[in-house]
Amino acid sequence: MFVYNKVSFSREPAASADAASICKDAARAGRWLAAKRSAWDWILMSQFLRAKVFNMAGYTPGEQPRDADVVKLNTNENPYPPSPCVAAAISELLHHGRLRKYPDPLGQDFCQVAGRILGVDPASILIGNGSDDILTILTRAFVPESGLVVSPTPSYLLYKTLADLQGAAFQAVPFAPNWSIPEPWPVRDAHLTFVANPNSPSGTMVPVSALENLAQQLRGPLVIDEAYIDFADATALPLCRLANVIVTRTLSKSYSLAGLRFGFAVAQPEMIRQLTKVKDSYNCDALSLAGAAAALDDQEHMLLNRTKILATRGRLTRQLRALGFQVEPSQANFVWVTRSDRPVKPIFETLKGRKILVRFMDYGVLGDGLRISVGTDAEIDRLLNELQGIV
Ligand SMILES: Cc1ncc(COP(=O)(O)O)c(C=O)c1O
């Protein structure tokens, strides 16, 4: 029994040694009162929070610098503006006083547009506040406490965080050579298997035939995370005919709407009906629904930006290789860059000092590298100029 402020707790502070060290650090800096307060807050949090949440590291999103001068190539945003139809749709909604009312919980107008563009039944679409929201809904729906989430690795780090939050185990299956998936797949009993395709950080693709084979081997659902699919050659959308396949999409990348927050999932209509029970009723606001439908409807704009990005991606890949980097052939709006002759972290740090932000990613024994988003031609020229002086 532990008592603080007349409140008694059933367990002792989880790690009072850590509380003591917080105290010592702050005390050394001469902030006695703050030290005492933060140590107590820390102890209290260890009592209130689920142990899983208290002990987990949490997901660290890519840095979002406030300095507008920074060349930002670290979170795979689109360097070009979204379709002008997005602002027009949002403005129309604002001018018609529609914020007063709740949005359509199912986003049916969006689903109609997406169904037409993708050639799928609108009833097979689930809307999300970004595709991260969709990934959260899927984890909550399929994975019980102490369940198992599996993903090939290195891949999107959020999958492990979602497993942690759910109180589930996470098993990382290393990619086979050339970023292919092991065949046969070693873990068939997972409650949920995530495959990012194209994969992040590698930008590589697993062929649709290999994903179909994987779906057939699994006893649980397979989520194919197609956040970057508009920069790739082939989608796995046709696999949604299988009962255990869910394909997820985002408007953050190819549609230049990372700030709007909109994503969606495609699966069998019965699966979507079940998943709807798990999401927040109004997980997408009226502005994002209107903007997302307008963006999807303007395919011409998205494809124009795509063409520019693919051309810059090709040039970036060639010139990085000429500078001695190994660059994976990418089907996304970023490239994965490694070097065998020197560590890449100092390169990341030097670039950062010169206001060019790329993403350094360290996967332990599986190695580290730089993930570089494809920016405008001017941004990529600046990056390449700096790199010439560094390597
Ligand atoms: C593989 C992958 N999936 C999903 C997301 C999340 O996208 P959103 O902005 O829609 O939440 C990202 C974002 O970087 C990603 O890399």
Image (spheres, grey):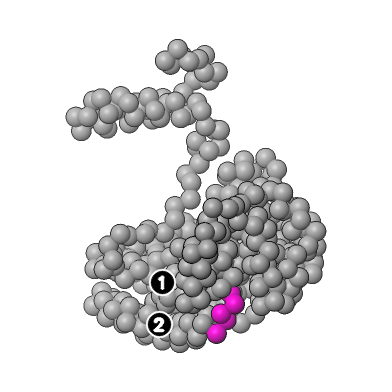
Residue furthest out toward the left: 30
Q: Which residue is mark 1?
A: 372
Amino acid carrying mark 2 in the image:
Leu
Q: Position of residue 286 (x, y in %)?
A: 56, 59
Q: Quadrant location of residue 341?
A: bottom left
Point 56% across, 33% down: residue = 50
Residue 298 lies, with reference to residue 213, above or below; the image says below
Residues drawn in magenta: 296-300
Q: Is residue 264 visible?
A: yes
Q: Residues within 10 Å of mark 2 (few under 14, many from 20)?
A: many
Point 62% across, 43% down: residue = 166
Q: Is residue 252 visible?
A: no
Q: Secondary structure at mark 2?
A: helix
Q: Position of residue 65 (x, y in %)?
A: 32, 60
Residue furthest out toward the front: 96
Residues at badges 2 and 1 in contact (C-beta under 8 Å)? yes
Query: In the image shown, does 329 or 381 lie closer to the viewer?
Result: 381
Name the mark on residue 316: 2
Point 44% across, 52% down: residue = 60
Q: Position of residue 354 (x, y in %)?
A: 24, 68
210 relative to 75 in the view: left or right: right
Name the mark on residue 273: none
Point 55% across, 18% down: residue = 10
Q: Position of residue 355 (x, y in %)?
A: 26, 67
The residue at label 2 has a CB less than 8 Å from ligand 1:
no
Q: Secondary structure at mark 1?
A: strand
